[in-house]
Image (spheres, rainbow, N blue to C red):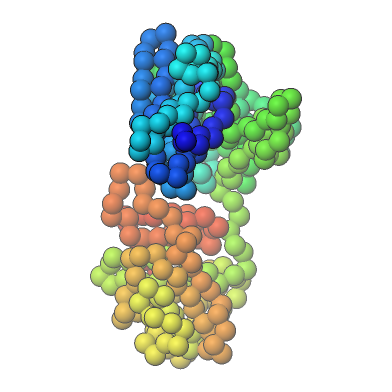
Amino acid sequence: ESPNLVAELISGVNDNERFEYTIIASDAGGIRDVKFFMATPNDVYFLEMAPVGGGEYIVKLPLIESGLTAEYYVVASDETGKKTFFPETAPDTKASFTVADGLSIFNSVELSNENPSNAEDIVFTVNVFDASGVSEVSLYYVINNDIADNKIKLSLTSSDKITWTGTIPGQADETKISYYLRAVDNKGVKSYYPFEELDAEGNVVGDFDHDDAASWPNISVAPLPLLNALVINEIQTNGSPDFIELFNGTNASIDISGYRIYDAGINASQDFTDAYIVPAGTSIAAGGFYVIEPEFGISKTSDDIFIENASGQKVLEMLGANWPAMPIGITNAYVVARKKDAADLWERRTVETKGTSNN
């Protein structure tokens, strides 16, 4: 008998993404090969489908210009040369699909600062791809939980129609800026960042809705620090020596005598014998700093750092999963610091502010 071939008609192909087509082929005597034939008005393809296990075979289609119709069929051959076609009328009568004008793809969206200071401009750099070309990219934003109807439009500029830039003017401390991006291709199709998921009737079913400002990503301008708390404020992982800086954000002195500091990248478990122990009689004044220089150094692999008080209770920690990545183009930023003393967000720096304000 000929091979058994299970396949579905191709649909949903667009000009911006390579469509991945999967079928299932089986034969008691073994499958020799599965081939995919496709013809467009411009090109003809006869591609080998790759086995991926469990009888599945896959092929990734080339990008095809929107509006074109492609004819195709699949043929599976067994070890004796017997063949099965999909559709059954192939190769005389082939199946077909028409390529849609796909949504533009936002390859990257970079902000000059996701936690800007007072009056600091925020520069957006956006890379967008569309096979038909991008005619415009716009940034829309509102201030302090305003509604979408009051959004401000910022038209981004580009010299190559690929990379686009624009600037939101600096805002006052504690301002919340909510925003989204929209790209329009040369055929008038609109795409959004974040991605806006719609159902068959065009209703929004995902988390982002460009008509609902509460669903937009947001930026906080110099958010309030973690007031009334003792925090890990700065970490040096490649210094002479390495150090951990504590900051007392309260209005009273804090006694840290006997506090124990651990680095999970160096100390194998919480049953430590080589943790750094803060000397007796040590306190940090209100608004003051205390620098710890453990003899074991600090791991550069972004492992967890945590601190216990003299009673063995964990009081502070900095989890490696939260350590910020190296800045683009910089490979030696080994200082991990809060953007401002006791602030919620962290950044990597090449210059330390040991024992002094991060501000």
Name the residue at 52% across, 18% down: 89
The single residue placed furthest to the front in the displayed view is 1
Name the residue at 45% across, 72% down: 305
For residue 335, above or below residue 16 = below
For residue 26, above or below residue 249 = above
The single residue placed furthest to the left in the displayed view is 240
The single residue placed furthest to the top in the displayed view is 41
Q: Nearer the viewer, residue 213 or 251?
A: 213
**Residue 288 is at least partly visible in this image:** no
**Residue 206 is at least partly visible in this image:** yes
For residue 198, above or below residue 305 = above
Q: Nearer the viewer, residue 268 or 344?
A: 268
Can you give x and y, in whole percent of width and height, for residue 203 in the image? 73, 29
Can you give x and y, in whole percent of width and height, for residue 264 in the image? 41, 75
Name the residue at 39% across, 43% down: 30
For residue 163, above or below residue 262 = above
Q: How many marks?
A: 0
- Residue 321 falls left or right of residue 200: left
Q: Nearer the viewer, residue 224 or 33?
A: 33
Can you give x and y, in whole percent of width and height, for residue 300 in the image? 33, 65
Quarter assignment of residue 194: top right
Can you give x and y, in whole percent of width and height, for residue 344 in the image? 55, 57
Name the residue at 43% across, 79% down: 262
- Residue 336 falls left or right of residue 11: left
- Residue 205 falls left or right of residue 157: right
